[in-house]
Amino acid sequence: MKILVCMKQVPQKDAPLKLNETATWIREDVSYEVNEPDAYALEEALRQKEKHGGEVVVITSGPARAQQVLREALAKGADRAIHLEDNAFVGLDAFNTARAFAAAIKDEQFDLIFTGLQSDDYGYAQVGVILAELLGWPHATIIMQIEKTDAGIKVKRELEAGFFQFVDMPLPAVLTIQSGINKLRYATLIGIKNAKNKPLRKVALADVQSAIGNNLQMIEKLYIPQKTKNTEFIEGPPAEVAKKLVEKLRNELRVL
Amino acid sequence: MATTAIPTTKISGGSFLLDDRRPEEVFTPEDFSEQHQLIGQTAEEFAVNEILPNVEKIEHKDFSVTRDLLKKAGELGLSGVEIPEAYGGLEMDKVTAAVIADHIAKYAGFATTWGGHTGIGTLPIVYFGTEGQKKKYLPRLAAGEIVGAYALSEASSGSDAMNCRTKATLSSDGKYYILNGEKMWITNAGFADLFTVFAKIDGEKFSAFLVEKGFPGISIGAEEHKMGIRGSSTCPVILNDCKVPVENLLGEIGKGHVIAFNILNVGRFKLGAMCVGGARVAIEHSIAYAKQRKAFNKVIADFGLVREKIANMAVGIYTGESLVYRTVGMMDAALNEVDKSSPDAAKETRKAIEEYAVECSIIKVWGSEMIDYVADEMVQIYAGYGFVEEYPAERTYRDARINRIFEGTNEINRLIITGFLLKRAMSGQLPLMPAIKKLMDEVLSGPSSDELDGPLAEESKLVGQAKKLGLFAAGAATQKYMQAIQDQQEIMGAIADMTIETYAMESVVLRTQKIIQAKGENAAALPLAMTRVYLSQAMGKIEAAAKKVIAAVADGDMLRTQLAILRRLAKYEPFNVIELRQQIAQKMIERGKYGIA
C-alpha cells in the first residue's frame, strides 16, 4: 500500500503563547512540535506498511522550520517527504491547504491518505475531509483501526458515548486518524542518521499558486480570555436554593 | 562522523585565558542541527516515557528494570554514539553525546548507571582495545546486551590510582594473568558483565584487564548503603585467583596509567551535561511547588526571596549549557581533523579530546557545584516538605552530592586545571608567562581604558577584566613560588576558581552575543538578564579568590600596591541584580520550567 500522511507543525503544547501585533495569530518565536494526531497517523501508516508492504510518504506545508516534522517522520521510517515550503502556507485556511496538497500530489498514486483527526492549533478537522472531496475519494473520520480486506479496507470509527461504527470502504480513500490508537515509536539514532539521505521534494508556493484562491475563512481577532472570579451565595431552604441554582446555570451561565 | 552545525576553527585548549573569541567561533545550543534536535527529542522521550515511570522500582534496586532500560536505550542507539560504526556503534559527534547525556539525566539513579556503562565502562575498549577486543565486546555494549563497569578505586586508593594493591601474575603456562585484590565503589558492579580492572603485574607494572563476570575467581560484594544515587549499583569487586586470558590485557603492560587518566578525561564533559539536565528537572519541580504552596495568602512564587532562588537556578542552567556546548563544539572541530580510517584513529581521537582537559575539568567542577546549589535551593523552596522523602527535593539533594566526588573529586580536578595550564605555560605551549608579564607592565603604567562597542560591550569588558585578574594573581603566585607552586594546593585551587569562573563568564557572554546577532536585542532580553546576573556572581568570586592569593604571596607595601591594582581590575558598575532576577524568575514561573525565550 502506498500511503500519504499529511502532517503539521504546531506550537508546543506547553509553549507560552503570545499574540502577534495584529492579534490574528500567535507570535512565531515559540517552540514547535509535530501535531499529536498526525504522529498517530504516521505510526498507523508505518504499521500498515510493515504489514502489507508499500511506501509511506509524508507531506507538510509551512516555512523552513516545518521541515523538522518531515525529518522526524523520515527518521521514524517514512520513505520520502514533500515540503510545500513558504511562510504563506501558514495563513491558508483548510480549503486552500487541501487544494495546495492536492496540487502537490497530482502526479502521485496513493492508495490511502491519512491525516490526524485535527490540528492542535486551529483544530478545524477539515483538511482531510476537503482533500477527499477534491480528489473525489471516499473518506472516513475519527479512525481507530484499519484492516485490509479483499475489496479495500474495513475501518473502525469512534462515535460518541462509547459507540463505534465499522465501515467497509474501497480504495483509494482518505482517513482521519484518532489520537492514542497505537503506541508511538521513537526515532532511533540510526533512523535519524539515515533520514538525512532520504528524498525530500520541495514544492514552492508558485508551483501550487494556480490551484489555490482567496481564503474563505479568516481569523479576525484572537484574544486571551480574561480570568474572572465571582462568588455568589444563594440562601434559603434547600429546595429553593436548588431551583435557583438550576435557573442560574441554565439562563445566566448557560452550562446546562 | 557527523559534523557540528557550524564550522569552528580549531582552538587550542586553555587558550581562552589569553585569546578573545568572537561569538561566531563558539558553538551554542542555538546551533544544534536538525539531527541534534531530533536525537535530543528521542533521549528526552525515552527518559520521560521509559525511565521516569520506573523510578520507584529502580530506587529500590530492582535492577532487572535497569537492565531492560539499558537494552532499550541500546536499541534506540542512545548508548552507541561514541563507538565506531565498524563495531556496532553510530560514531557521532561529541555534541550528540552531550545532548543525549543532558536529556537522559532526568533521574540520577539511572543516569549514573547509563553514564558508567557508556562512559568508563565502554570507552577503555574504544580507545585502547585491540581489534579482537573491540569486535568481541563493543557491539554488545552498544546494544546494551552486556553492561560495562570500571574497576579502578580500592579501599585505600582513589584519586591516587597508582597506589593500587591489586596484583596480576602470569600463569606458569603463560596463558592467563591471575588477579588478586579488591576493588571498591564500582558503579554497575551488581549487574555488570564486563569490568575494566586495574592491577599491577608482579606488583609493579600498572596495567588494565578486561574481566568478564563469568571468569573464575571474580565475585561481587554487597551493595553499598549510599547517601544518594540509590538507583545505581555500587559494590566491591573481589578478585581471588581470578583467571584472565592474556588476550584480555587492555593496552600495554605497565601503561595502565595512560588508560586510567585518559578515560576520565574523555568522558568528563558528559558529567557536566548530566548536571545541567538534572538541574532542569529540579527547577521544574521547584517552580511547580512554589506556584501552589501558599503562605500569608500568597503563593510563595510571589516572594522575592523565592524568586531569587528560581532565577539563580535558571542562570545556572543557562551558563551550564553555554559551557558544555561551547566545549563539545571545540572538541568536534578538533576531531573533524582526525582521519577516522587511519590505524592511529583511536589515539588521535584521544589526543584531540585531551587537548581540552582543562575545559572538561571545568565543566565537571562547575556543573557538579551548580547542581548541588540548585538541589540545595530546591530543598529550601520545599522547606519542610523538602526534608521528607515523599517529595522529590530530598532525593534530588542526596543524588546531587556524588557529582563533586566521582570522576575525579572536584579538588583533584581543580589541581588538574591549574596544573595543566602551568605545565603548558612552562613548556611554552600556552604563552601564559609573556601574557602575565605584559599585564604586569600594563598595570604598573596606570589605568588604561580599552573601550569596546557593539552588543554586550560592557559585559565583554568584564570578561577581559576577569582574565586579567586571573593572570595577575597567577603571575604574583608563580613569581613567589616558581615551580614549587604545585605544592601550594590552596593557591592552585584559587587560581582554578578564577579560571573556571572566567571560562563560564566568557561562555555566557559569547552565547548571548550570538543570540543577539541572530534575533536582535529585544528577543534576547532573558538571556541578557541571565548573563548579567551570572557576571555579577562570578566577578565576586574571582575578586575574592584573587584577594586570597595576593594576601598569601605579598605583604606590607607590596600587598597594598597589589591590592590597589586588584581593586582597579575588579572595578565595574554593578548591575541591578534584584530587578534582573525578578525578570528572570517571572519568565520561568510563567513557563513553569526553564527556557530562554
Image: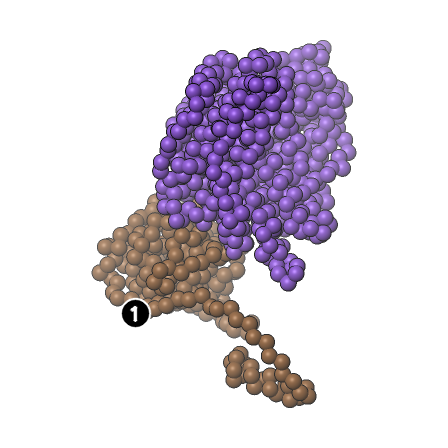
Of residue B503 and residue B332, the one placed in the foreground of this image is: B503
Determine which residue is flagged by label 1.
A216
Image quarter in which the N terminus of chain B is found: top left
Q: Position of residue B400 (x, y in %)?
A: 65, 39
Of residue B308 and residue A220, the one placed in the foreground of this image is: B308
The structure residue drawn at horizontal position 43% and vertical position 33%, both measured from the top left corner, is B461
Q: Residues within 10 Å of mark 1 (few under 14, many from 20)?
A: few
Residue found farthest to the front: B557
Q: Chain of mark 1?
A: A
Color of chain A here? brown
Q: Position of residue B421 (x, y in %)?
A: 52, 20
* Up-down relation of residue B283 to residue B566 (above or below): below
The structure residue drawn at horizontal position 34% and vertical position 55%, both measured from the top left corner, is A61
* Up-down relation of residue B196 to residue A11 (above or below): above
Instruction: Say which chain is purple.
Output: B
Residue A114 horizontal side relative to residue B401, left or right: left
* Up-down relation of residue B221 to residue B441 (above or below): below
Residue B299 horizontal side relative to residue B18, left or right: right
